[in-house]
Image (cartoon, helix red, strand yellow):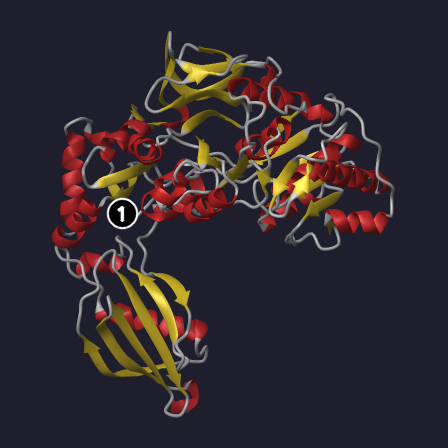
Amino acid sequence: MSGHWVALAELLSAPDPSRLAAHGPAMTQADLAARSLALAGALAAAQVRTAGLWFDDAAELACALLACWRTGTRAILPSDVQPATCAELDGEIDLWLSDAALPGTAGRTASPAGLIAQTGAAALSACRLDPASAGIVLLTSGSSGSPKRILKTWDQLASEVEALQRQWPAHAGATAATVMGSVSPHHMYGLIFRVLWPLCSGRPILRPQLVYPEELQRAAARHAPAIWISSPALLRRCGPALDWTALGSRVERIFSAGGPLPEETAGQFAARLDLLPTEIYGSSETGIIAWRQGAGHWRAFAGARIGADERQALWVESPWTALAREQTADTVRLCDAGFELQGRLDRIVKIEEKRIALPAVERLLARHPYVHEAYVGKRKENTRLTALAALTPAGVHALRNQGRRALVAALQAHLREHLASLAIPRSWRFMQRLPRNAQDKLALPLFESLAGPRPTAPHLLALPATEAGERRYEVGIPLDLAFFSGHFPATPVVPGVAQIGWAYDTARRDVFPGLDFGGVEVLKFQKLLRPGDVAELTLRWNEANAKLYFAFRLDGEPCSSGRILHRPRHADA
């Protein structure tokens, strides 16, 4: 290994006090080792055999992991800390270590500093860590929504880190790039790329997770050169969000994983930064498998042996799978240059005995000028397909000026040129973008929710109140608002009664919870609200005359306004 390489098992042995391990705030390698060994002493004194780890700070997570390794404590990394997740794990965890308050774990959660102070134990001695020691357990929801436990030994993690270093060594004498990321360190990709590999390769890590493109740009300006650990979802949002000239050559490399990176997104970085993102293909179960830049073939990492079974589904064997064969559900076409991904076996559904590859339907939809990206699935109670489609500006224009029925007909006609009728979605949901989770996945529970009844409420975002005390909100009009179907089919418009209802419901929630509807007066409608519009709602409660004043504005111009009368329930008594 070249550069400032330190094997994973040696991170606590002889740390370099002159080299940074982290920024924000700064932590040297010696600081990291000392903090890890102090926490190890506390874990040993408290006799913690299984610890749940959740840290927003990637450097603190690294210290906790190394402390667990030093004491032989099994570390569990949940995919989230929702109440149900914590409740499910709490029975098998001796102690939660975190830099945040976790739901339902009161009295069983400690910060590293708090546990060290509570036990008063001495730090453990530095030594080479045992690769055979208790490893870590990752929890991943996958596409089904059911949590899956994945055990990784420290030996497997070390092998994967070494494979990355062989592929992209840090050169001696070069300024060490700061590694910063938009992905969580509690999942395999973020853990390896944002935490473990940088520590071994002598690259400092930026502690917080940066979920917005603007945050990554600011961080790259402060800590150049930078390496971004990102996802397709973030990179797709970089176009209008970044000052490309200011970013310049501050970014040394960009990694992307979690899903396919659109060619146009990769091309944007190549054109503006002269830098093609490096895509990583793998999973929590398999670890890294292959990489590529641009639209070329996937190339397996050195040490990974790949092949395909009788269904043409990829399998992999590597030191980081303990040389066991891991079978994937991804179909491939193997070739001398590597392989091409063809789609997932588990995304093939049967409708009336006909097998339909959902990714193929999605790819065809994405070729239509109205669709940016699509996700197709089958709801549990339905026998036909549902399509979630993120529309392009041309698609939004068609929806606004021709209506939903014409838009659906155009997309179905496009698919009919390539697919049998059973493969054409019967149900459609339209939106500005497809929502995804932190791992850039659209999980099954989210699909079921989005594919359900069309929305009847807008997307509301609270804004700062005016000096006069008026409450203000940004109001995003959904593309697929249920009210559009009858108002009007070919020219969708938000009905006035819906606007009154939104003002009333928002006021009851935020302004005057006791508001009882007693009628409307001085009602004015001056400008239409249409699909995709972003309006502003102002609310003011007048206690003296018991009236709620509301107004919707679009681009500074009035759309509607009026006064909702308060009629207390006892008024008729």
Q: Is residue 389 visible?
A: yes
Residue marked by disc 1: 430
Q: Is residue 182 left or right of residue 324?
A: left
Please say if 310 is above or below 471: above
Q: Is residue 384 left or right of residue 198?
A: left
Please say if 104 is above or below 11: below
Decide which of 466, 243 is in the foreground and name it: 243
Give residue 130's quadrant in the image: top right
> Quarter of the image containing the N terminus?
top right
Residue 564 x %, y %? 32, 81
Q: Residue at x 68, y 39 (%)?
A: 28
Say few, some or many: other residues with alpha carbon within 10 Å of mark 1 (under 14 / 14 to 19 / 20 or more): many
> Quarter of the image containing the C terminus?
bottom left
Tell me the element at label 1.
Answer: strand
Mark count: 1
Q: Amino acid at mark 1?
A: Phe
Please say if 154 is above or below 269: above
Q: Is residue 77 visible?
A: no
Give residue 394's quadrant in the image: top left
Q: Residue at x 32, y 32 (%)?
A: 262
Q: Residue at x 29, y 56 (%)?
A: 478
Please say if 543 is above or below 366: below
Q: Is residue 80 left or right of residue 513?
A: right
Extreme-top residue of the structure: 336
Residue 439 x %, y %? 47, 38
Residue 65 x %, y %? 69, 35
Q: Residue at x 39, y 48 (%)?
A: 449
